[in-house]
Amino acid sequence: MGIERTLDLVRQRFFWPKMAAAVEHYVKTCNRCVRRKSLPEKAAPLVNIHTTRPLELLCMDFLSLEPDSSNTKDILVLTDHFTKFAVAIPTPNQKARTVAKCLWNDFIVHYGIPERLHSDQGSDFESRLVGELCDMTGIKKSRTTPYHPRGNPVERFNRTLLNMLGTLDNEQKVKWKEHVKPLIHAYNCTRNDVTGYTPYELLFGRLPRLPVDLAFGLPIKEPPTVAHTDYVKNLKARLEESYKLASKNAWRSADKNKSSFDKYVKPASLQVGDRVLVRNVKIRGKHKLADRWEHDVYVVVSRTGDLPVYVVQPESGGGPTRTLHRDLLLPCGFLPPCYSDNAPNCTILRRPHTRSQSRLQSSPDVTEDQ
């Protein structure tokens, strides 16, 4: 009911010194209320990822859609963080073998080996097969914290791809698989607001020749004929200048996004030993009565560098440690140390009781059956 409504009910019937403070404390520390009603905190500032060259960081994720006419429902999405160049491969499944095969056949053999591969903690991305591919090619593997999509930049492109596919006619949507590559090519040939360049130009050092150029007979802007060595020198100089400007624009855009995001953040870092609840991220679909926070209380064990990422373990001592983002944790130092609905040996908090309750508790003739 909340503090105000509870206090209103109590005031109509009782009075004691500092009653308002007592009611407020009771409501704020109510075990059931905290787990069900407490909203997630926006307690961690935005941490930006910065890159300075192509293929320094390749981000990877799966996008799932309704099945098309060929029963395809998954798209493996790959984006180069610096150039924003995207590759999307419709796949029959999300198995590790499929991921490794697509990485090699559809990206590495065409564009080269990335320095680092970034993904979420899905079993398909964290599999031994993908790990062996990374070891064989010298790719460093990194991953996001669980249930924190902001940690993977490819999530933003997923929304863009969904919007593009959503603009198809209903007849075309039935065969959306056939339209993925043309739409991705259109995206790569369009100027990106973050870098100020098209992803195609940043990756290949030249503008693409598009169907519109052929349709209108637009001439090809050919540079003067030069030797191969001079062409390479000029291309290198143009790319270096483009990379500097793109990096500068990306930093400016990232700082702007961070300032906008941080306006609504109330910084609240955690310390080692703090007691916390973990966000119940499994509530989906019909689980409308489920608690927002898990039942078990956790303790902060350590922090990952300067990032708002913490390693926590169950306060009871059982169970593995978990690495989670700050936004998935709720401080709960006020909860009883061993609170459990089904644990009779927990420490019971003493509460006020009336004389009639005392007589009932001391009477040997009163049983639960009565």
Image (tube, rainbow, N blue to C red):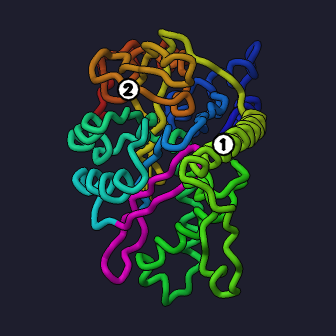
Judge from the rendering whether residue 291 lies leftward or rightward of residue 100; answer left or right.
right
Distance from disc 2 to disc 1, alpha carbons, whole Å, reads 47 Å
Query: Which residue, given by chain and number where applicable, does mark 2 sit on?
Result: 322
Q: Residues within 10 Å of mark 1 (few under 14, many from 20)?
A: few
Q: Is residue 61 visible?
A: yes
Tell me the quadrant of the picture where the N terminus can be found. top right
Q: Nearer the viewer, residue 222 or 169?
A: 222
Q: Nearer the viewer, residue 29 or 51?
A: 51
Residue drawn 50% across the image and 28% down it:
31
Q: Where residue 301 sits in the image (x, y, percent)?
A: 42, 13
Spot the residue most to the bottom: 171
Residue mark closest to the camera, 2 vs 1: 1
Q: Residues within 10 Å of mark 2 (few under 14, many from 20)?
A: some
- Mark identifier at residue 237: 1
Quarter holding residue 295: top left
Judge from the rendering whether residue 317 lies leftward or rightward of residue 256; answer left or right.
left
What is the span of residues highlighted in magenta in the rendered image? 64-90
Q: Where residue 273 sits in the image (x, y, percent)?
A: 48, 9
Three-letter amino acid code of the residue under disc 1: Ala
Q: Is residue 358 visible?
A: no
Residue drawn 39% across the image and 58% down it:
76
Tell me the quadrant of the picture where the C terminus can be found. top left
Q: Where residue 328 sits in the image (x, y, percent)?
A: 52, 33
Sequence-first disc among 2 and 1: 1
Three-letter amino acid code of the residue under disc 2: Arg
Considering only vertical position in the picture, is 165 above or below 11?
below
Considering only vertical position in the picture, is 317 above or below 212?
above
Q: Where residue 18 sits in the image (x, y, percent)?
A: 76, 14
Please tell me whether mark 1 sits on a helix, a strand or a loop. Answer: helix
Residue drawn 73% across the image and 52% down it:
196
